[in-house]
Image (cartoon, rainbow, N blue to C red):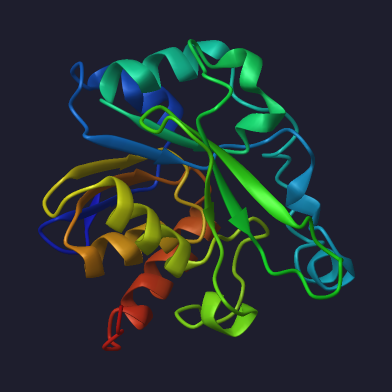
């Protein structure tokens, strides 16, 4: 485990298997972006396919099984699960009204118009819709992961659904966007990334990004 700060702990390991070591309701909120099972490791447009063509890890060949979501709900008081529209049948007691929508401000239609996250702690659909793509990417410095989410998206989620000092769980760290957001929003984080190459890239991105003074 690498403790980047006293509150940010990042682990190169299997976050799905790690759940069994935690107590019931140990985390205030789990914010996770697990594999969707749609082959996203290959990239979603020509530029990404070229960039990630040598990274044939196969990590997005299938979504986690139901046991993962049961354990996730056990160790966290609430959950925000990206891509749940692809595997909603695996999530126990998933209310069809409880969704966050990320409007991706897609100007050229190469990507999906939006992404969806199921949330245990909202009663209606909520939309994150920045004014421009430039605003969305203001805290990001290049793409290091094919399913990378913007820091601004996670800062919005933390602002709306958590409080300062809350303990957050991330079982699939990916590019590290949530870690950066937690640092600036003063949330505690335990996060896992199973792939060593992505883990090291996320560590480097975190260190570079947090050198800068970023305005909310």
Q: Quadrant of residue 197?
A: bottom right
The location of residue 45, given as percent across then percent down, is 86, 64
**Residue 181 vs residue 131: left or right?**
left
Task: Examine the rendered structure and indicate whether residue 14 appears above or below residue 1.
Answer: above
Task: Examine the rendered structure and indicate whether residue 114 appears above or below residue 84.
Answer: below
Q: Residue at x 53, y 17 (%)?
A: 91
- Front residue of this view, candidates 207 and 120: 120
Q: Quadrant of residue 28?
A: top left
The location of residue 136, given as percent across then percent down, is 54, 75
Query: Quarter of the image containing the C terminus?
Result: bottom left
Q: Residue at x 45, y 57 (%)?
A: 199
**Residue 95 vs residue 190: left or right?**
right
The location of residue 118, given as percent across then percent down, is 52, 33
Q: Quadrant of residue 46?
A: bottom right
- Front residue of this view, candidates 216 and 62: 216
Task: Examine the rendered structure and indicate whether residue 142 appears above or below residue 61.
Answer: below
Q: Is residue 176 visible?
A: no
Q: From this viewpoint, which residue is outermost toward the front? A: 124
Task: Examine the rendered structure and indicate whether residue 137 appears above or below residue 187.
Answer: below
- Front residue of this view, candidates 125 and 52: 125
Q: Residue at x 62, y 72 (%)?
A: 143
Q: Is residue 32 visible?
A: yes
**Residue 47 vs residue 133: left or right?**
right
Looking at the rendered structure, the number of numbered marks drawn on it comes to 0
**Residue 117 vs residue 8: left or right?**
right
The location of residue 162, given as percent across then percent down, is 24, 47
Q: Residue at x 31, y 52 (%)?
A: 160
């Amino acid at each position: 485990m690498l403790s980047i700060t006293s509150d940010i702990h990042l682990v190169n390991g299997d976050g799905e298997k790690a759940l069994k070591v935690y107590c019931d309701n140990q985390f205030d909120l789990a914010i996770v972006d697990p594999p969707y099972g749609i082959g996203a490791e290959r990239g979603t447009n020509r530029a990404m396919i070229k960039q990630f063509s040598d990274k044939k890890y196969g990590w997005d060949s299938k979504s986690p099984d139901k046991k993962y979501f049961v354990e996730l709900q056990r160790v966290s008081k609430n959950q925000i699960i990206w891509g749940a529209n692809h595997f909603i049948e695996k999530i126990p007691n998933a209310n069809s009204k409880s969704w966050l929508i990320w409007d991706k401000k897609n100007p050229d239609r190469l990507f999906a118009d939006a992404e969806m996250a199921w949330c245990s702690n909202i009663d209606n659909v909520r939309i994150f819709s920045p004014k421009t793509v430039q605003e969305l990417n203001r805290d990001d410095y290049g793409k290091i992961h094919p399913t990378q989410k913007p820091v601004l998206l996670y800062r919005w989620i933390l602002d709306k659904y958590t409080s300062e000092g809350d303990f957050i769980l991330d079982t699939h760290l990916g590019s590290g966007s949530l870690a950066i957001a937690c640092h600036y929003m003063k949330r505690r984080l335990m996060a896992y990334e199973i792939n060593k190459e992505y883990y090291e890239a996320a560590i480097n991105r975190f260190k570079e990004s947090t050198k800068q003074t970023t305005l909310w």
